[in-house]
Amino acid sequence: MWPSYSVSCRKDVDSLLRKGGSLSAYRANPLFPSWTGPAKGSWAERLERDAERRFGVRHAIAVNSGTAALHAALESLRLKPGAVVVTTSYSFSATSSAILLAGYTPRYADVDPYSFNITPETVKKVFTKDVKAILPVSLFGGLSDVHGLKQFGVPVVEDACQAVGARDQYGYSGTHADVGCYSFNGGKQVPAGEAGMVVTNDDAKAERIRLFSNHRENFYSKEVSGNGRMNELTACVAYHGLLDLDDRNQRRRDLANKVFTDFLGMVTLDMAKEFGEFSIPRKFGENHALYVCPVKVKRNRGLFIKRMAKRGIPVGAGYIQPVLSRYPAFRKYARGPLPVVEELSSKTLCVLSTLTPDRPLSYAKKVAEAMRESLR
């Protein structure tokens, strides 16, 4: 069953409950600098220090969700109210919601059809002088081109909520940007129920994020905030989830590569003609954290989903449908057509809860066979 928790994790959680107490460790009172951040020796503090070492970043701040991480990261930029932030419409609603909650205005760029992410080329088409930040989403566990987006000269906040542990020649996801955001939601690479983290190498932004996530403590503060703190039980589970993150991400890649290596040799054009075209991803390398495994068909997507369901393999349609730029809450921020986003939304399939780290490699063969049979 996924997610699952190690014996040592369960033991430490049980110890916390037996010990009793408030199960809260976070402090961020600006009048007491020694209190900034979680109490020394707490699980929240251990989680933050371990994340800093693991990801090679100066500051890791534990918060209670990926959405809270995005909100706090955007607030730390100190942009003027209404400032435009370029992002993607092909994402979970939290991406756009965080921009609006921070008092800014989202603007949607189209995405690359292979990476599913915004690129310097797509951002350039919507970039104007009122754009003050860019928020790329490293969708499905594949990294955004953060370094390419820095050419625009505005802060970049990476939504790496689906890409915890993904890495390339520059380092881990989230650490390339001015601020990076992770989710430790129950289905993510570090499953901890509801939790998140902000990472940055900027000391001033880190301090703002800590204060923002703890009401700014309101001791003579000129600003108000809310509660984004992570509790000790969640921090303990997340800490243990980080320990074997790289191994579990590699397991996901091994399973996906097995499926599509087998599948490549099984599919013929005659099999796929009912669906117009069946596109499968390229080999997943070590830079991919594989939150979701996407494939594409041109038509009869619903038929393929039904056939897979009969074989016990759940498949999602489109990841997000409709896309955010069509949501009543967000559509007024769209500026022109987003053809690639719309195409992906209508043609993409997501192998969701199947390729999880607990599965044996034999399961990959089962998935591949179900795909082949469903195309007949």
Image (cartoon, rainbow, N blue to C red):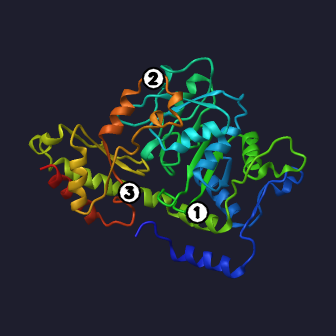
Label 2: few (<14), some or many (≥20) within 10 Å?
some
Q: Nearer the viewer, mark 2 or mark 3?
A: 2
Residue 37 to residue 339: above or below: below
How far is mark 2 from mark 1, CA to CA?
36 Å
The residue at which mark 3 appears reads as 252
Q: Tell me the amino acid under the disc marked 1.
A: Ala
Residue sitting nearer the eye, 218 or 147: 218
Image spot of residue 358 (x, y percent): 38, 67
Helix or strand or loop: what does disc 3 sit on? Answer: helix
Residue bearing mark 1: 238
Amino acid, disc 3: Arg
Drawn side of residue 215 relative to residue 277, left or right: right
Of callouts 2 and 3, the N-terminal one: 2
Q: Is residue 183 above or below residue 99?
A: below
Question: Can you identify the residue that label 2 sits on?
Answer: 121
Disc number placed over residue 337 in the picture, else none? none
Corner quadrant of residue 339: top left
Find residue 8 and report its horizontal and vertical position in percent: 56, 76
